[in-house]
Amino acid sequence: MLSSASHGAFPASDPGFAACNKRNPGSGCAAIHGENRLLGVFGSSSHCIATHPSDLPVVLAALNATIKLQGPGGTQRTVEIDDFYLLPGDTPQTATVLPPGELIVAIAEPASAAAQRSHYLKLRDRASFEFALVSCAVALDARDGAVRDIRLALGGVAQKPWRLPRVEASLQDGPASNDAFAAAAARVGDGAEPASQNAFKVKLAQRAVLRALQTVAA
């Protein structure tokens, strides 16, 4: 599901969470200084620390998918999936570039050697019917002991699927070894800004990336 919702937007009927900038712009964010264990550690703002709840977009982000959109009158445009989802900034109520009246009509995944060797790992509090605390999608082309192409995306850590370009760059054309994977995974937390209750997600993301890399390279 290419959901535009986010984990962290609370129902209007719950008076305990009256302040939610996603639901009621300008009302504030109760989670920033409140219950935020499940929420974002990357790309958040002073207005919102919600996380994207879906699994499929994380996989599509790692596969460099594109999304075809069709508007009123049949006008069409194509956007990269990384450009389709937005960070909260000062308008957290807008999670995608999809305006009213425009529809998703197709999703395309470019052919690549990395896509043929991919893995999705989802870590959660319980085994079923649960959003990811952290998820990781990896696509890897490794030949002759070297990384020829690598793509990584995290879920459960930001309002959009979170690509890891610096981690990818640290692995590109290097050895496809456990030591290299461990060194790259240690950089996953670069730029993280955890809230009061969710700093554990940074370490969990590092471990998820390492485990996903080891699994897909096995």
Image: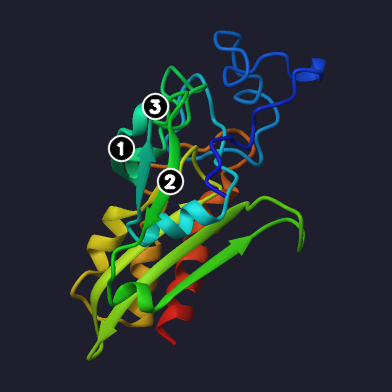
Mark 1 neighbour class, 10 Å CA radius: few under 14, some 14 to 19, many 20 or more: some
In the rendered structure, which disc, 2 or 1, sits on the residue that comes first in sequence?
1
Mark 3 neighbour class, 10 Å CA radius: few under 14, some 14 to 19, many 20 or more: few
Q: CA distance from mark 3 to mark 1?
A: 9 Å
Q: Please tell me in which quadrant of the rendered image residue 179 appears.
A: bottom left
Q: Is residue 4 left or right of residue 77?
A: right
Quadrant location of the C terminus in the rendered image: bottom left
Find out whether the residues at labels 2 and 1 contact each other: C-beta distance under 8 Å.
yes
Mark 3, secondary structure of its residue: helix
Residue 72's disc is 3
Q: Amino acid at mark 1?
A: Gln
From this viewpoint, is residue 202 visible? yes
Mark 2 neighbour class, 10 Å CA radius: few under 14, some 14 to 19, many 20 or more: few
Q: CA distance from mark 2 to mark 1?
A: 9 Å
Residue 76's disc is 1
Mark 2, secondary structure of its residue: strand
Q: How far across and how far down the image is residue 80, in percent?
A: 30, 46
Q: Amino acid at mark 2?
A: Val
Mark 1, secondary structure of its residue: strand
Q: CA distance from mark 3 to mark 2?
A: 13 Å
Q: Residue at x 36, y 28 (%)?
A: 73
